[in-house]
Amino acid sequence: MLTKHRKQAILATLKRDGQVIAKALSASFDVSEDTIRRDLRELASEGLLQRVHGGALPSSPAVGDIVQRQQINTVAKLAIARKAAELMLPGQVAILDGGTTCVLLARHLPPTLEATIVTHSPSVAVELVNHPGIEVVLIGGRLFKHSMVAVGAAAIEAITHIRADVYFMGVTGIHPTAGLSTGDLEEAYIKRALAARAAEVVVLASTEKVNAASAYVIAEVTAANTVVVERKTPTTLTDPLAALGLTILHA
Amino acid sequence: MLTKHRKQAILATLKRDGQVIAKALSASFDVSEDTIRRDLRELASEGLLQRVHGGALPSSPAVGDIVQRQQINTVAKLAIARKAAELMLPGQVAILDGGTTCVLLARHLPPTLEATIVTHSPSVAVELVNHPGIEVVLIGGRLFKHSMVAVGAAAIEAITHIRADVYFMGVTGIHPTAGLSTGDLEEAYIKRALAARAAEVVVLASTEKVNAASAYVIAEVTAANTVVVERKTPTTLTDPLAALGLTILHA
DNA sequence: ATTGACATTGCATGATATTGCACGATAGGG
DNA sequence: CCCTATCGTGCAATATCATGCAATGTCAAT
């Protein structure tokens, strides 16, 4: 058994069980506990796990949780959300996508604003319950857990009964030729349906999304779209989009 | 069991239940109460929880909307929710009402349960996102902010496309002659529609609801209903219902 | 094939962490 | 006010740890 293989196996076990115990590893690999301890120490120094008395734990808590995604790139997302919130006008009907940025947008709507928000995200809905002036319309459907939004035929059907002034869309990629894209097919359908029902589409994206493309295309990048990105080396990153006639707002 | 793992589990339990009891933790982790006390002391010194006699409470009171209502009669509601959670069977399709008790029910579903939950409450939906085995179907519609559930024609229409095995219903009043009632007309319509689409209806109510009546009637009290109430002077309070042939479960 | 540099491993040893128990102090309910 | 459950502390037993060192294995150059 090679050292490297053993370390890989340790990491695999850790990922599977959420923890590893030195004694158990020693037995299963048939090496001394000292060797395991050495392995764990080295893996810990590489940041691949977190050493604790008796074994080890994952260095970063379990992934996949929306709470966690919420914590990455918070500053940029907050800036984008604030900027986008300014675009809402009193009396408008706006569609809010799922995703952390849209939750932040909902949180930062002006407290005195009177408007209607349509959303297929329970998180956004919960966020808006305490806002006195916002009427909330919830789009139902099967809940896609990864991004926590309603998808599927029921959602598509419900969307056809809506007409909105503006749709705040979150995307995974904005690419000059690949267009607007996202990582899930069902979500792409939903976003396309929502975009079709709104007079104006505002895309919210941090600059890391610009020039990136995901598997499922939502729409072409056209002059009709407004993109809100954070202010960050604007010339280099947004030029490809500006060339397409997109309206670009820097947060 | 690693010490750190145990502490994480304590924090998770605390987050889930809103409180932890030293003795119960000692039993569930199979360590001495001293060890638990030490853990709680250390977690408290890190500001992760607040130590109290007999156990611990969250350091910062949970934020959110219905949290305030959630804090009244918590013990009874929690007991009811736990009892009702036991009624769920694998593979079933269940409808969950809005309301704090149903959120608690969602939170206490067995982690290994595989089932489908239909709900018109974004709060319940959000609660279930991290449950690996539960498929969530969201009923859309206009959001009634007071109780934070979807209501209106769109919701009624969506409900007609559902057939469920069981409907866990929250009510404001259970009265021998006035029947099951609630405080909002729209909600009453929704509850009636949901009840019509479920093979079995389980009413969740603390004893204070028994013999009370609100403005809008949902349904008559019939032998077909099961009522879950907390165990509290059962003879005096539930007798009027038992006389009607209701199945009564004491939590 | 041999040699030497280097990595890996297991063991011994002293250090540290964790745990359960004993005992007196304290808090809460009746 | 008393009684009981819970608490905090000191202490001893055990488990786990880090380190040094010697034995063994690996591999490339000769």
Image: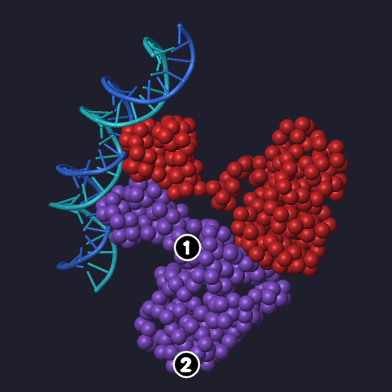
Chain colours: A red, B purple, C cyan, D blue
C23 lies above or below B247: above
Does residue B139 lie above or below A45 as drawn?
A: below
The chain containing the residue under callout 2 comes to B
Q: What residue type is labelled 2?
A: Leu
Residue that numbered label 2 is attached to: B244
- Provide residue A196's location: percent of width, then percent of height: 82, 58
Looking at the picture, does residue C24 appear above or below residue A2? below
Give the x, y percent position of residue B118.
Answer: 60, 70
Whichever of labels 1 and 2 marks the residue nearer the N terminus, that label is: 1
- Nearest to the observer: residue C16 or residue A109: C16
Q: Where is residue A128 in the image (x, y as percent from the top left)?
A: 64, 60
Above/below status of A109 relative to A129 = above
Look at the image and tell me whether residue B197 can be seen. yes
Q: Position of residue D8 (x, y in %)?
A: 25, 49
Q: Quadrant of residue D18?
A: top left
Q: Residue at x 51, y 63 (%)?
A: B67
> Is B60 placed left or right of A151 in the picture?
left
Quadrant location of residue A32? Answer: top left
Q: Which of marks 1 and 2 is in front?
A: 1
Residue at position x 62%, y 41% from top?
A73
Closer to us: B40 or B129:
B129
Q: Which residue is drawn at 35% across and 46% down?
A: B2
Q: In which quarter of the image is the C terminus of chain A?
A: top right
Output the chain of dot 1: B
The quadrant in which residue C27 appears is bottom left
Q: Residues within 10 Å of mark 1 (few under 14, many from 20)?
A: few
Dot 1 amino acid type: Thr
Quarter holding the N terminus of chain A is top left
Q: In this view, does A110 lie to the left or right of D20?
A: right
SS state under label 2: loop
Which labelled disc corresponds to residue B112? 1
